[in-house]
Amino acid sequence: MKVVNTQEAEAQVSSGDLTVVDCFATWCAPCKAIKHVLDKLSADLPNITFLAVDIDNNPDFAAKMNVRSVPTLLFFKGGSVVETVRGVKNEVALRDILAKL
């Protein structure tokens, strides 16, 4: 999973492809816990783009996306947010969400 800035994230999500954006902070223990799950999903599902945006370094992205807590996962399809997950979810729950999209 690649860590990107606001401009890179916005360029990718505007492509219309299914993209998962992990909004995280380096000081956040739950963010560190979910990173391993997201890395595994990224490796298992190469047709889906997984990105990470550090909200402390990109507060404009966090504000625009209404990120109020971390971790927040934003699922984009067709250039729009189609699902939002706040907090840590297990791999099975995230796979279920992705299967529906």
Image (cartoon, rainbow, N blue to C red):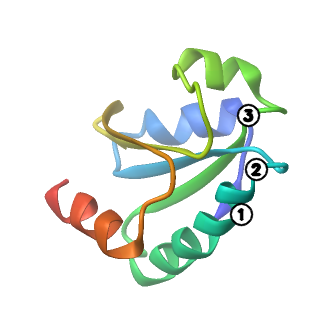
Question: Residue 55: x and y, percent?
Answer: 73, 34
- Left or right: where does residue 87 sit relative to residue 16? right
**In the depicted structure, whether residue 95 falls above or below residue 12:** below
Q: Which residue is under mark 2?
A: 28
Mark 3 is on which residue type?
Ile
Give the quarter of the image for residue 78: top left
- What's the residue type where badge 1 is placed? Lys
Q: CA distance from mark 1 to mark 2?
A: 7 Å
Which amino acid lies under the numbered mark 2 shown in the image of this protein? Cys
Classify 18 as above or below 47.
above
Q: Are marks 1 and 2 in contact (CB under 8 Å)?
A: yes
Q: In the orientation shown, which residue stands out farthest toward the left?
A: 100
Label 1 vs label 3, nearer the camera: 1
In the image, which disc is placed on residue 32? 1
Task: Count neighbours of disc 1 (C-alpha within 10 A) and say few if under 14, some if 14 to 19, many if 20 or more.
Answer: some
**In 3D space, how far apart are the residues under numbered discs 3 and 2 (Cα atoms)?**
11 Å
Among the two numbered marks 3 and 2 on one chain, the one whose residue lies closer to the N terminus: 2
Q: Give the CA separation, mark 1 to mark 3.
A: 14 Å
Q: Residue at x 84, y 33 (%)?
A: 57
Quadrant where the N terminus lies? bottom right
Q: Residues within 10 Å of mark 2 (few under 14, many from 20)?
A: few
Residue at image mark 3: 55
Q: Is residue 16 left or right of residue 62?
A: left
Q: Quadrant of residue 23?
A: top right
Q: Position of residue 14 (x, y in %)?
A: 44, 33
Q: Identify the residue at image location x=50%, y=57%.
A: 88
Determine the residue positioned at 35% across, 32% down.
81
Query: In what element is the residue under mark 2?
Result: loop
Mark 1 or mark 3, earlier in chain: 1
